[in-house]
Image (cartoon, coloured by chain):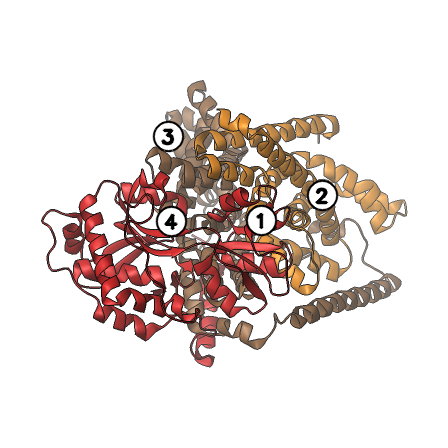
């Protein structure tokens, strides 16, 4: 056989090694990760969990008992929603309001804050719940009567809404009616698209894949305004002084905790837990730890359990 | 099925935009590809190197990354163009890299005697390329160029990710409103197939007309 | 660098031509340099070159995060290549089969799938299938549409390979008493696969690039990891520039591999020839 050592010429392993080495070299020169994002209060999270309650007893044969046996709560959620459920690339921890509530619920059921987040695209949440891939969904999941036909909603645990953002110096766009005939930026596949269509049918909607892309597009003048959930935009507007949130939310989106359709027992259980953490002040602490890092003042009044149509 | 008829104008606009994106990008790709292929066979070493670097860099980064980079990055270096224009330019340049490879193989397929004859007649490099080699070379690669045309059509769907409401994005938006995905996506798929069928016919006709049997 | 063709269109430049080329080169380099400098200045004026906008990409946690994304990219690509490659062989065999019951469906599959964008297939798996009770895990939401669409491309490559193998090879196999299936498997396919190896590698690079559609299904591959990072550090342009660089390094290495294979194939006789002709021990 006259085979020469072909392995030497394989460039891929070399390239990968080179990359890793570059990374390692960079590591030694730099300190911790650069710009910190508001809402990433690492230490506070542990305090929250320490103060969180654990359910005294779980009904035999219930979903909760199964979760406890497994030892972790499987949550349908996001990794890229600042202040709500955003992965910190340095610590790999998921931070924010939704993420904290998920951890607290996990502790309530299993005694430990062990959560596995299944990154779910917003259109598939109903399916994920009904086929049992996830136990609960914490993902800016607005309670609507239509969705309630397919899933059960505990909560609402937080009330948000869509807001309009513009460049700082822009005037004349403050209410949804002002969007008439304007070019409006929205996240692809977000509830903002139908909401804009309803408020201003002749507005031209331009969509991009992520929040930073939408913000960049707004700053570059690719649209007159950007419509997005308030919780997401609060962080962005705080961090970037060149854009400004105009007015108050023009929709009311009560976030619910998505559960398997028909699991009344678990819905009751989760609602009881929500009432408990609202009464004990833990709810307010979770708010302070996430949204409260960019909004002045005290935590708002949490929405009443079962108040949103679809969550009764 | 009335989901489709109710939203015929959305689908129509999407289809039109897809066709425009494809044709403009294809024209751009042909120009870019021919220029780059010519650079790669030119006597100037810097041009050859630049042509090669162009093909390497463009082909080895996903189109989606190029689109996002161009849409958000170009305004930062002072080049602000609309989303449609940016998409056309990026897809042209991207497909241009593939076209360049096809055209170069066409140039290589031209018998050496043709180039020698052109030079013997006293034609310069540009003249012999333009008048003798390229016309023959391009004819032999009609089929590969037809494949590139279909690939371009497929790739225009990526423009959906940067806010161009072409056919795929239009289908997706109709689905968001109507939530009857299967009919909507099947319709879009059929529209794509019809468009590529058209390209196939044109390519076939051109090939029959121009093919040089060797 | 200088392929045989590059000598086709010009003679070795003489002294005057060389001087002209030198002047043109210097001018071109100057103009290109000036343009790049201008773009960079604009870029810097917009604050995009500020050190603190780049510092995160000099730290290990960011790179670790990106490299994990790259690992997911490679995993998804490897699975999609394996599935699409296997399906491609089957489809190619179907297309050259004497039975029309195999030939027609295989041909129809290739012709249809070849003309539907991968993104549309991704949307079908993402939005349509869950409504009919089929909700795949994220990994498969990316891998399934990529495999479906690339199977057609692989099938065409294998078919070209099979057709390039001389008919006599198959006939010789049949004459030796092999069944058609065994003759294909033992005689034709190995030769065909060898001949199309470079195309297989470039198609694989294409699959690797296609995994960037994970961006749409939120599968945590390289581009989606970039999206999460940009959401976290708000450094959109810097993040995507770094991502583009990573793709470039990986894919350029694979492309180089393809060229090396191609060159080796041109210079070395095929294995069957080597084995038939006894070679001297080195």
Residue drawn at (52%, 36%), measured in percent from left and top? B171
Is residue B159 visible to the viewer in this orientation of the structure? yes
Which of label 4 and label 3 is nearer to you? Answer: 4
Disc 2, SS = helix
Residue C121 in picture, x, y percent from top left? 47, 38
* First in residue order: circle 4 vs circle 1: 4
Query: On the rendered structure, is C179 left or right of B30?
Result: left
Q: Give the number of the disc on residue B30.
A: 2
SS under mark 1? helix
Q: Gap in Å between the C-alphas at discs 4 and 2?
A: 49 Å
Identify the mark at residue C182; answer none if there is no mark. Answer: 3
Do marks 1 and 3 share a chain? no
Residue A177 marker = 1
Report, in whole angstroms, how far the alpha carbon at label 4 lies from the one at label 1.
23 Å
Which residue in the structure is indicated by mark 4? A142
- Chain letter behind tag 4: A
Q: Residues within 10 Å of mark 2 (few under 14, many from 20)?
A: many
């Amino acid at each position: 056989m006259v085979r020469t050592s072909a392995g030497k010429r394989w460039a891929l392993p070399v390239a990968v090694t080179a990359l890793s080495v570059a990374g390692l070299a960079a590591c030694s020169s730099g300190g911790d990760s650069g710009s910190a994002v508001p809402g990433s209060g690492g230490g506070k999270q542990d305090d929250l969990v320490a103060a969180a309650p654990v359910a005294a007893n779980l009904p035999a044969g219930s979903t909760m008992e199964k979760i406890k046996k497994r030892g972790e709560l499987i949550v349908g959620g996001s990794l890229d929603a600042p202040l709500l459920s955003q992965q910190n690339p340095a610590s790999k921890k998921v931070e924010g309001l939704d993420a904290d509530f998920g951890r607290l619920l996990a502790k309530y059921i299993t005694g430990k804050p062990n959560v596995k987040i299944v990154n779910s695209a917003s259109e598939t949440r109903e399916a994920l719940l009904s086929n049992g891939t996830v136990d609960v969904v914490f993902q800016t999941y607005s309670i609507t009567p239509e969705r309630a036909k397919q899933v059960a909603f505990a909560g609402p645990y937080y009330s948000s809404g869509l807001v309009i953002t513009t460049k700082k110096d822009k005037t004349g766009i403050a209410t949804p009616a002002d969007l008439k005939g304007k070019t409006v930026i929205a996240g692809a596949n977000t509830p903002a698209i139908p909401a804009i269509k309803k408020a201003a049918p002749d507005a031209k909607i331009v969509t991009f894949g992520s929040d930073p892309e939408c913000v960049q597009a707004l700053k570059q003048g690719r649209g007159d305004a950007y419509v997005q959930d308030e919780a997401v935009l609060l962080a962005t507007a705080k961090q970037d002084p060149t854009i400004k949130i105009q007015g108050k939310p023009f929709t009311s989106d009560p976030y619910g905790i998505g559960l398997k359709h028909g699991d009344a027992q678990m819905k009751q259980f989760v609602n009881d837990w929500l009432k408990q953490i609202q009464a004990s002040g833990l709810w307010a602490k979770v708010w302070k730890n996430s949204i409260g890092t960019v909004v002045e003042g005290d935590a708002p009044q949490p929405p009443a359990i079962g108040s949103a149509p679809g969550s009764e | 099925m009335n989901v489709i008829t109710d939203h015929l104008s959305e689908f129509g606009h999407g289809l039109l935009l897809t066709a425009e994106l494809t044709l403009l990008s294809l024209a751009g790709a042909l120009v870019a590809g021919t220029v780059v292929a010519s650079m790669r066979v030119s006597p100037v070493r810097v041009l050859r190197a630049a042509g090669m670097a162009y093909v390497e860099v463009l082909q080895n980064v996903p189109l989606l990354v190029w689109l996002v980079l161009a849409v958000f990055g170009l305004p930062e270096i002072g080049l602000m163009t609309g989303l449609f224009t940016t998409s056309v330019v990026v897809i042209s340049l991207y497909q241009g890299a593939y076209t360049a490879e096809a055209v170069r193989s066409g140039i290589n397929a031209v018998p050496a005697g043709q180039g020698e004859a052109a030079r013997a007649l006293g034609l310069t490099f540009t003249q012999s390329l333009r008048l003798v080699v390229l016309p023959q070379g391009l004819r032999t690669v009609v089929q590969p160029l037809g494949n590139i045309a279909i690939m371009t059509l497929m790739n225009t769907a990526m423009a959906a990710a940067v806010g161009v409401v072409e056919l795929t994005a239009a289908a997706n938006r109709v689905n968001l409103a109507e939530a009857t995905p299967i009919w909507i996506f099947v319709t879009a798929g059929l529209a794509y197939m019809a468009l590529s069928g058209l390209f196939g016919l044109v390519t076939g006709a051109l090939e029959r007309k121009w093919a040089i049997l060797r | 660098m200088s392929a045989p063709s590059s000598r086709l269109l010009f003679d070795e430049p003489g002294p005057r031509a060389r001087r002209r080329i030198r002047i043109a080169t210097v001018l071109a380099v100057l103009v290109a340099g000036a343009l790049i400098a201008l773009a960079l200045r604009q870029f810097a004026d917009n604050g995009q070159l500020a050190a603190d906008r780049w510092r995160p990409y000099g730290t290990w946690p960011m790179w670790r995060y990106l490299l994990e994304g790259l690992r997911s990219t490679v995993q998804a690509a490897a699975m999609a290549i394996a599935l699409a490659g296997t399906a491609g062989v089957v489809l190619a065999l179907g297309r050259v089969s004497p039975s029309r019951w195999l030939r027609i469906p295989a041909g129809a599959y290739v012709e249809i799938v070849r003309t539907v964008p991968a993104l549309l297939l991704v949307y079908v798996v993402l939005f349509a299938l869950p409504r009919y009770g089929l909700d795949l895990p994220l990994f498969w939401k990316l891998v399934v549409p990529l495999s479906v669409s690339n199977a057609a491309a692989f099938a065409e490559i294998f078919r070209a390979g099979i057709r390039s193998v001389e008919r006599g090879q198959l006939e010789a196999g049949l004459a030796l008493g092999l069944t058609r299936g065994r003759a294909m498997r033992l005689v034709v396919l190995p030769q065909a696969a060898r001949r199309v190896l470079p195309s297989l590698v470039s198609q694989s690079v294409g699959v690797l690039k296609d995994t960037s559609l994970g961006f749409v299904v939120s599968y945590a591959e390289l581009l989606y990891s970039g999206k999460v990072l940009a959401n976290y550090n708000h450094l959109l342009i810097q993040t995507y520039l770094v991502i583009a660089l990573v793709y470039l390094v990986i894919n350029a290495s694979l492309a180089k591999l393809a060229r090396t294979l191609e060159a080796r194939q041109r210079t070395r006789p095929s294995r069957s020839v080597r084995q038939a002709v006894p070679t001297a021990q080195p």
